[in-house]
Image: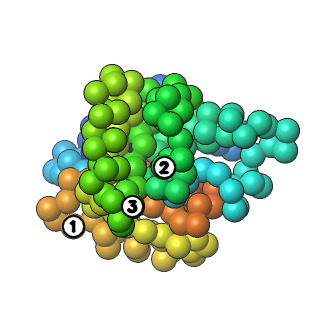
Amino acid sequence: MFLFGAGTLEGDDISHNLLPKFSDDHYTTPFRTTREMRKMVIEVAAYGWQGGQWDAFYPEDIPAEWRLDFYGNEFFAVVAPWEAWRREDDEELLEWQGQVSDDFRFYWELPQSDEGAAAERLQSLRENDEFAAHWGGRLDKVSQLRIEAPLELRALRQAVEGAIGPAEESLLVVVEPAAADCLRSARDIALLLGGG
């Protein structure tokens, strides 16, 4: 299954109301497709949503606390880097969950040192229903393909196709440094691979 959100397509059964809707050349609703022969989930996520190249993605007048909400309107998964979430208290991490759609997923990076304490903190937070609903997983526990942006479109497709192994049930494509254009391209490639 290729995960992009709310609808499912099986075989050649295509319903127009399940197709992604566009607004200002961006997806406004997520999209799912299913292959009959193989169930595979491909999620595309940026490594973080703030700083660096992301500054050009956001409108100049948007407050910093609204950036995750803005990001979540276009993309449906993100890697929360250890450096971004370690300084936040639990209440702030729970607030992040309320800023995104129901099908949005967070993948959590853990530190190289003191992994146990960070893992315990995440496990404790997962007891909260809203936090658990947005749980994508620990970054070190999911099959992933790291893409260094920028990457030519053909090379990006070959990398995604090459990362899909016969035993894989899911793949997280992580774009780093996080660049909106590369993230959009990776999302579109995953969509095309799932529609075949």
Query: In the image, what residue type sits under mark 1?
Result: Gly
The Cα atoms of the two marked residues, 1 and 3, are separated by: 27 Å
Residue 30 visible to an observer of this rendering = no
The label number, if any, that marks residue 86 in the structure image: 2
Query: In the image, what residue type sits under mark 2?
Result: Arg
Q: Nearer the viewer, mark 1 or mark 3?
A: 3
- Estimate the x, y position of residue 11 in percent, counting from the top left: 26, 41
Quarter placement of the N terminus: top left
Query: In the image, what residue type sits under mark 3?
Result: Pro
- Estimate the x, y position of residue 187 in percent, counting from the top left: 49, 53
- Estimate the x, y position of residue 87 in percent, counting from the top left: 54, 47
Q: Nearer the viewer, mark 1 or mark 2?
A: 2
Q: Height in image: 126 above or below 52?
A: above
Give the residue number, with chain letter if any, for mark 3.
111
The Cα atoms of the two marked residues, 1 and 2, are separated by: 33 Å
Residue 91 visible to an observer of this rendering = yes
First along the sequence among labels 3 and 2 = 2
Q: Residue at x 65, y 51 (%)?
A: 50
Few, some or many C-alpha atoms within 10 Å of disc 2 (few <14, some 14-19, many ≥20)?
some
- Estimate the x, y position of residue 89 in percent, counting from the top left: 50, 36
Q: Residue at x 49, y 41 (%)?
A: 76
Q: Is residue 74 left or right of residue 4?
A: right
Few, some or many C-alpha atoms within 10 Å of disc 1 (few <14, some 14-19, many ≥20)?
few
First along the sequence among labels 1 and 2 = 2
The label number, if any, that marks residue 165 in the structure image: 1
